[in-house]
Amino acid sequence: MDKRKTLIKICGITSIKQAVQVAELGTNAIGIISVKESPRYISPEKKKEIFKTLKDLYPNIERVSVVKNSSIESIIKNFLGEPNETVIQLHGDEDIDYCQKLKQKIPSIRLWKAFRIKNKADLEKIKIYENFVDAILLDSWNNETYGGSGKKIEQKYLEDLSFSKPWWLAGGVSKEWVYEIVRKINPNGVDISSSVEISPGIKDINEIKFIIDEVKKY
């Protein structure tokens, strides 16, 4: 397996202070949850403030807005004027038609699509999306939530995966699993949220630093 640099996204950030702290550690992407039922949800006004700060101080970090089953009109409204996001991450049941229409309406934005993986067959359903999104994110299946559960995808489903677009691994990415992820699974990126939290939306900066250092080491 060819080794590549593994990128790191910290998701579910809820304050400017922690966004800056995480950025300083050298993360590649920072995500904010725009899904109201999530315990990590923050208002559009607060999101804008955090992303504007990152845009000014760390312009090379991807600023990812996570949405779920939102109307295309509501997303477009958010992008009137000068948006602070660089990526929209679709974390719901959005189909190919939705992805295609959103791309046509906002061609400047990068589109990442999350898929919840319960078994091997779920991976086969992803291929048809590859021409309509810029990156793929694999998360674990959970009946109660669409993300942030801390549950892992079974590793046997992840080894030797190949997509035509970059792919990120989410779901239970922790310091205990990071060695196996980088050495055996080798995704383009890892998406970390609940495994580095003190409480929902409040990150343990030392835990994040440890994982970033470990990923860079391997």
Image (cartoon, grey):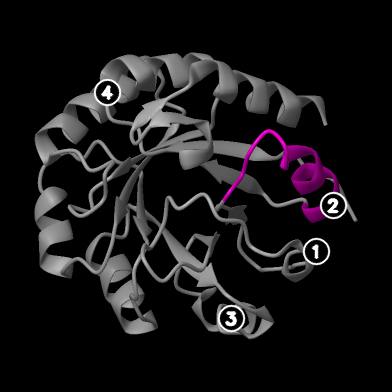
Inter-mark Cα distance, 3 to 1: 15 Å
Q: Earlier in the sequence, mark 2 or mark 3?
A: 3
Categorize mark 4 by other alpha carbons within 10 Å: few (<14), some (14-19), many (20+): some
Inter-mark Cα distance, 2 to 3: 20 Å
Mark 3 near mark 4, Cβ–Cβ under 8 Å?
no
Categorize mark 1 by other alpha carbons within 10 Å: few (<14), some (14-19), many (20+): some
- Compared to residue 24, the image places residue 62 above or below, namely below
Residue linked to disc 2: 184
Q: Earlier in the sequence, mark 3 or mark 1?
A: 3
Residue linked to disc 3: 122
Q: At label 1, which amino acid type do we have? A: Glu
Work out whether residue 173 or residue 110 is closer to the camera in this orientation and state it.
173
* Residue segment shown in magenta: 172-185
Residue linked to disc 4: 15
Q: At label 2, which amino acid type do we have? A: Lys
Mark 1 near mark 4, Cβ–Cβ under 8 Å?
no
- Magenta run includes residue 49: no
Residue 47: horizontal and vertical position, in percent? Answer: 20, 34
- Magenta run includes residue 178: yes
- Compared to residue 108, the image places residue 218 above or below, namely above
Residue at 74% x, 68% y: name it. 162
Q: Which of marks 1 and 4 is nearer the N terminus?
A: 4
Q: Is residue 26 in sight in this rendering?
A: no
Secondary structure at numbered mark 1: loop
Secondary structure at numbered mark 4: loop
Q: Is residue 102 in sight in this rendering?
A: yes
Residue linked to disc 1: 159
Secondary structure at numbered mark 2: helix
Classify residue 177 by image quadrant. top right
Q: At label 3, which amino acid type do we have? A: Asp
- Please give left or right for residue 16 compared with residue 26 in the image: left
